[in-house]
Image: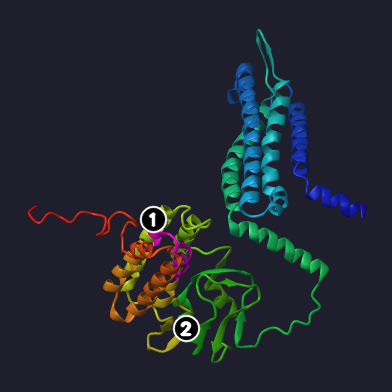
């Protein structure tokens, strides 16, 4: 238990790794100044005269002290954002982040190295001595700090993503699971016609042409069991093989599918719509009158995206080889799915806002007139639901009638609010 307590304390301490790096920098400074005390190893044409060396080391020390404070401020800000946005219990995960600890240690260690190297620079009337090796190492450390700073800014911003934070917690949970409940080897595995994934992640890219070619070569059909944008658990069935699996290289099949920590817009049109819907919903999270203007701006873009989809042929999810044989089947979102994704949640969240209702009605009316006849029923269903929900949310008959007037800007450009054009002009 003593070893466990000590290990847990060191693991969860933000300062331990930076302190080790600072101590290593102190030792390195002592070694470099001892190896080249008189500056004979590195000529002053490289390090500069004593005055220049002092200025270099002073600037490095001052800059690294400022940079260490900046990194600590960024870390505190990240903790505050994570606590307010996700959960107060996520703090431990951020404080245990080894890259953050290493960056702090490198900046603080470079500061300590430069401060100790300054004491060995001497200036005399005839010149003085410069610990050339120490100055050269300090310059190399500064260059490393510049690279680390750029990398760390990317790391800390990436770490605040939902996918990164949930991934941290999930990975630690699975590690604990393996320790507390180890596998007993009784997992029966999957049937032979199923190919499993090797890791968990969101399906964000599929090489359809390669899968079709592999299926054609093996004279079989492949069925991808997950749609782009779905989260696939580890060791879950990824592909079903219909036909002879013997000639199929499993590693190549898995290699045609890209799994990552979160959805992307590589092949996932629905994810772009999902993000716009999230913006509209978040602006109305505390009620229909919190920020309806932001919701209307999101609906503007949703209207435009769905209008671009309305007359385009959507893929059936069946991919054929050159002879016309279906070799790959992939779950693919169809028109009704795009319509429900675009309108369902925004309609339910904003039914009590006249501005949102009028903008939604305007968008639906335009889409019904623009879309082909086969795609109009899904839009008409959304319009009927909108009228029903808006009618229930309105307090009076007059408010109900006013809310259901189509308006491209929510409130401001509909026929009941603007003057008609002068026919003589």
Residue in the image at 62% along x and 36% along y: 70
Q: Position of residue 401 (x, y in %)?
A: 34, 65
Q: Which of the 4 quarters of the picture holds residue 17?
A: top right
Mark closest to the chain's N terminus, 1 or 2: 1
Crowding around mark 2 (Cα neighbors within 10 Å: few <14, some 14 to 19, many 20+) is many
The percent coordinates of residue 233 (x first, y second) are: 63, 73
Residue linked to disc 2: 328
Q: Residue furthest left?
A: 424
- Judging depth in this view, the residue of 288 and 82 nearest the camera is 288
Residue drawn at 32 percent across, 82 percent down: 374
Magenta residues (range): 341-357
Residue plotted at (83% across, 48% down): 9
Q: Is residue 82 magenta?
A: no
The reply to whether the magenta stretch includes residue 347 is yes
Location of residue 20 (image quadrant): top right
The answer to whether one can see residue 23 in this image is yes
């Amino acid at each position: 238990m003593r070893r466990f307590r000590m290990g847990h304390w060191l693991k969860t301490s933000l300062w331990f790794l930076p302190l080790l790096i600072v101590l290593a920098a102190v030792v390195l400074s002592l070694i470099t100044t001892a190896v080249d005390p008189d500056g004979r190893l590195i000529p002053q044409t490289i390090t500069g005269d004593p005055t220049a060396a002092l200025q270099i080391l002073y600037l490095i020390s001052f800059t690294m002290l400022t940079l260490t404070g900046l990194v600590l401020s960024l870390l505190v800000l990240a903790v505050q954002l994570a606590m307010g946005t996700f959960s107060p219990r996520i703090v431990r995960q951020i404080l245990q982040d080894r890259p953050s600890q290493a960056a702090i240690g490198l900046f603080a260690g470079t500061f300590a190295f430069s401060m100790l190297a300054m004491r060995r620079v001497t200036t005399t009337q005839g010149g003085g001595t410069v610990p050339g090796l120490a100055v050269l190492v300090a310059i190399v450390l500064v260059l490393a700090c510049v690279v680390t700073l750029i990398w760390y800014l990317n790391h800390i911003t990436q770490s605040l993503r939902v996918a990164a934070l949930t991934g941290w917690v999930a990975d630690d949970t699975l590690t604990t699971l393996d320790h507390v409940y180890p596998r007993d080897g009784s997992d029966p595995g999957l049937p032979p016609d199923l190919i499993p994934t090797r890791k968990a992640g969101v399906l964000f890219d599929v090489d359809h042409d390669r899968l079709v070619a592999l299926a054609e070569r093996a004279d079989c059909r492949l069925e991808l069991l997950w749609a782009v944008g779905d989260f696939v658990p580890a060791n879950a069935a990824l592909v079903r093989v219909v036909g002879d699996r013997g000639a199929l290289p499993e590693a190549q099949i898995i290699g045609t599918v890209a799994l990552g920590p979160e959805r992307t817009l590589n092949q996932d049109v629905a994810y772009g719509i999902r993000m716009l819907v999230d913006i509209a919903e978040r602006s109305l999270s505390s009620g229909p009158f919190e920020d309806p203007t932001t919701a209307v701006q999101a609906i503007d873009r949703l209207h435009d995206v769905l209008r671009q989809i309305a007359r385009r042929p959507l893929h059936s999810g069946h991919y054929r080889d050159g002879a016309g044989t279906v070799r790959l089947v992939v779950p693919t979102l169809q028109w009704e799915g795009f319509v429900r994704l675009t309108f369902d949640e925004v309609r339910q969240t904003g039914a009590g806002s006249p501005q949102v209702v009028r903008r939604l009605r305007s968008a639906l009316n335009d889409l019904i007139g623009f879309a082909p006849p086969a795609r109009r029923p899904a839009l008409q269903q959304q319009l009927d639901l909108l009228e029903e929900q808006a009618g229930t949310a309105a307090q009076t008959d007059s408010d109900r009638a006013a809310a259901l007037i189509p308006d491209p800007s929510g409130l401001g450009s509909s026929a009941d609010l603007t003057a008609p054009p002068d026919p003589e002009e």
